[in-house]
Image (spheres, rainbow, N blue to C red):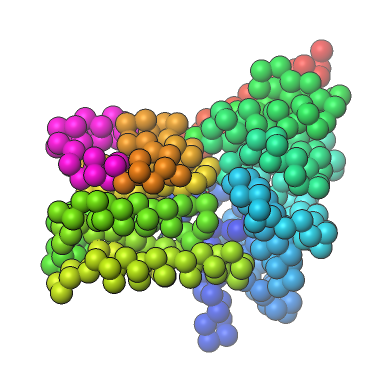
Amino acid sequence: MSKTIIVSNRLPVKISREDGSYELKMSEGGLATGLGSVYKQGNNLWIGWCGMDVPKEDESIIKDRLSKENLAPVFLSEEEIHLYYEGFSNETLWPIFHYMSTYAQYEQSYWDSYQSVNQKFKERVLAFAEPNDVIWIHDYQLLLLPGLVRQELPDATIGFFQHIPFPSYELFRLIPWRKNLLDGMLGSDLIGFHTFDDVRHFTSAAERLLPVQTTANVIHTDDRNITVDAFPMGIDADKFNSLPSSPEVLEIIKNYDDALGCKKIVLSIDRLDYSKGITQRLQAFEKVLLDHPKYIEQICLHMIVVPSRDTIPQYAELRDQIDKLVGNINARFRTASWHPIHYFYRSFPIEQLSALYSKSEICLVTPMRDGMNLVSKEYIASRTNNDGVLILSEMAGASKELTDALIVNPNNLGELSDAIVEALEMPASEQTSRMESLKQTVTKFDIKHWVKIFMDQLKEVKETEQSRRAR
Ligand code: GDG
């Protein structure tokens, strides 16, 4: 019987070492939840890096522990993490794919390691895969993997989904190894992105750089057809909708009522990343206080920045910039009983996030570029009274679906601060009509729907391709 294999850079599990033994904690993230219905069944499995440097002699312990959960680890050395993950994935592909080309490094050693780690993943896939299996590969760390697997298993069904944007050709062409990356991706039968713009950029790059033809969203190589399509990812909307009424979250909300000390809360939640527009958001908030002093002692920005990639110089620099901006704004505007920005550089349990989503009158999501942005959807799903206002950057994939948010260009400081004021003043009836329509979208197109439509289309394109070949 055929099985499904999910492959991603990281496994949906956190492993920690305590007193000489290993502890596993399953991830509660959206992708892990959505794909749980797939990888936990029967012989299906999920292959990925286990998230830590494991001593050789302990590898078999980890393998055995994980195999009980249908997980298969790939072991990466510290050097591989540095060159393949921090290096090529996050210092070459990430900035280019997010239109920050001046941040990109083109290091031969990064590329060499990216190739060899993708080979390593291939070996792991081949250790489990059989000819009729369905293999679903995720994201920009593994762009070469579909092609590598295809060479060994020509009949395998291979899907690939990229969670970050695909840039326009003029950006993508900057990468010295651009053709190899496209060749790798074209090993798939179905390639998915969050938006049609990404689909368009990808097919255009393939047409310009490779000897392929395209008809609509199908790319024809000499011997195969590859379908490219948009699959906007959703969230576990039921979970975010029911969390605010759970006893744990109600307790946190009760404590917040006394502690937050401002009439209206503007919420901001991101990983530390220059693509997320955090400094622009701070400047816009400052402009609101400057231009509209009536909001002093009335509003506050509750800002969570989750530590991420801070060994990479640009991330460390960004952290310093944020510290400085927050310090300046708080020093400039604070009063004896109030300060405008509550800034946290750490991550919180999901119950705490849920409490903040339900307490905050406004959610400010202003990335310079974002594949989708799930925070915007989680905020909507958490608004059980159908009030609150989402301010959303037009550069986030989510803006294509969430058209009833206040949509802004994050580079336009004036527009951003006007949107904050508009949100602060928005009548309750308008909030409700916008939020009801947003909620319909987020509830209908949730994570389960996303997994289903991708898997269904993968099956369909494979069947079409097989019957074409049989003719
Ligand atoms: C990539 C793409 C695309 C945040 N703080 C905490 C916490 N979070 C969770 C949120 C949300 C997730 O992290 C962030 O998701 P995003 O979509 O906003 O961003 P990326 O991490 O950059 O994800 C992105 C996504 O892939 C999916 O395809 O949307 O465009 O860049 O779920 O809730 N979770 C917890 N504590 C925190 O403090 N537990």
Work out whether residue 172 or residue 257 is closer to the camera in this orientation and state it.
172
**Residue depicted at 47% across the width and 66% down the height:** 321
The residue at the far bottom in this view is 19
Left or right of residue 43: residue 234: left
Work out whether residue 131 or residue 461 is closer to the camera in this orientation and state it.
461
The x and y percentages for residue 201 are 65, 31
Residue 11 can be seen in this image = yes
The x and y percentages for residue 278 are 43, 56
Range of the magenta residues?
A: 418-442
Q: Is residue 117 magenta?
A: no
Left or right of residue 41: residue 158: right
| Quarter of the rendering containing residue 412 | top left
Q: Is residue 429 magenta?
A: yes
**Residue depicted at 83% across the width and 59% down the height:** 108
The quarter of the picture where the N terminus appears is top right
Does the magenta stretch mainly form a helix, a strand or a loop? Answer: helix
The relative height of residue 319 versus residue 364 in the rendered view (above or below) is: below
The quarter of the picture where the C terminus appears is top right
Left or right of residue 263: residue 89: right
